[in-house]
Image: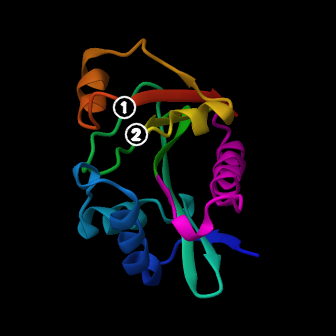
């Protein structure tokens, strides 16, 4: 059985390799950006570990609803955050069907609860919207110009989704 734990600096090489394996080239984010994100929010980045393998990961940070982080940009820092933004989740093909994504999501939900945040938000890419909708996320199209521009960095099919905690 796998375990969920906070991501560590020593995990970054495996995390970047998993990102490269799971995402199309247009979603590439450099190892430097990935590392900066962990350094900024180490308390809200998790990995799913099975034996010595990283089966999945999740990067999150406290944010505000309708504040979308552009692809490849540093995470924002928000006073008076009201949501936990799930920026990047990947699950190894070897681990699909094992409950890894759901377990990572549960970590995010628990963390949002400890911070008193009432919502989760994310951008769904690569046909993942149906998974997120099964997890009670709904599409939010009431976005300002800046949020729409940030969403566009993920491609035409990207959807901004939210849910209550």
- Under circle 2, the secondary element is loop
Residue at the image point whose x is 32% and y is 15% from the top = 144
User: Circle 2: is it few (<14), some (14-19), or many (20+) Cα within 10 Å?
Assistant: some
Q: Is 157 on the left-hand or right-hand side of 163?
A: left
State the residue in front, 142 or 77. Answer: 142
- Under circle 1, the secondary element is loop
State the residue in front, 130 or 44. Answer: 130
In the image, residue 99 above or below residue 55: above
Is 93 one of the magenta-colored residues? yes
Q: How is the image coloured?
A: rainbow
The residue under label 1 is 158
Give the quarter of the figure containing the C terminus: top right
Residue at the image point whose x is 42% and y is 24% from the top = 66
Residue at the image point whose x is 68% and y is 36% from the top = 135
Tell me residue 148's x, y (percent). Answer: 29, 22
- C-beta proximity under 8 Å, tags 1 and 2: yes
Instruction: Pick out the residue farthest to the right.
Output: 1
Residue at the image point whose x is 40% and y is 76% from the top = 12
Q: Is 40 on the left-hand or right-hand side of 89?
A: left
Regarding residue 118, the answer to whether it shows in the image is no
User: Circle 1: is it few (<14), some (14-19), or many (20+) Cα within 10 Å?
Assistant: some
Tell me residue 81's x, y (percent). Answer: 51, 35
The residue under label 2 is 125
Is 98 one of the magenta-colored residues? yes
Q: Which residues, given as a range, are shown in magenta?
A: 89-117
| Among the two numbered marks 1 and 2 on one chain, the one whose residue lies closer to the N terminus | 2
């Amino acid at each position: 059985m796998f375990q969920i734990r906070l991501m560590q600096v020593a995990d970054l090489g495996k995390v970047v390799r998993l990102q490269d394996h799971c995402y199309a080239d247009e979603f590439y984010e450099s190892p430097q950006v990935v590392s900066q994100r962990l350094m900024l929010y180490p308390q809200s980045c998790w990995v799913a570990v099975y034996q010595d393998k990283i089966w999945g990961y999740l990067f999150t940070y406290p944010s505000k609803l309708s504040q979308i982080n552009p692809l490849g940009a540093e995470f924002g820092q928000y006073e008076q955050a009201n949501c936990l933004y799930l920026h990047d989740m990947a699950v190894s093909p070897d681990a699909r069907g094992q409950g890894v994504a759901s377990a990572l999501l549960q970590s995010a939900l628990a963390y949002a609860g400890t911070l008193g945040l009432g919502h989760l938000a994310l951008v769904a890419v690569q046909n993942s919207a149906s998974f997120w909708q099964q997890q009670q996320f709904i599409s939010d199209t009431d976005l300002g110009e800046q949020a729409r521009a940030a969403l566009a960095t993920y491609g035409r099919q990207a959807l901004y989704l939210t849910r209550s905690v």
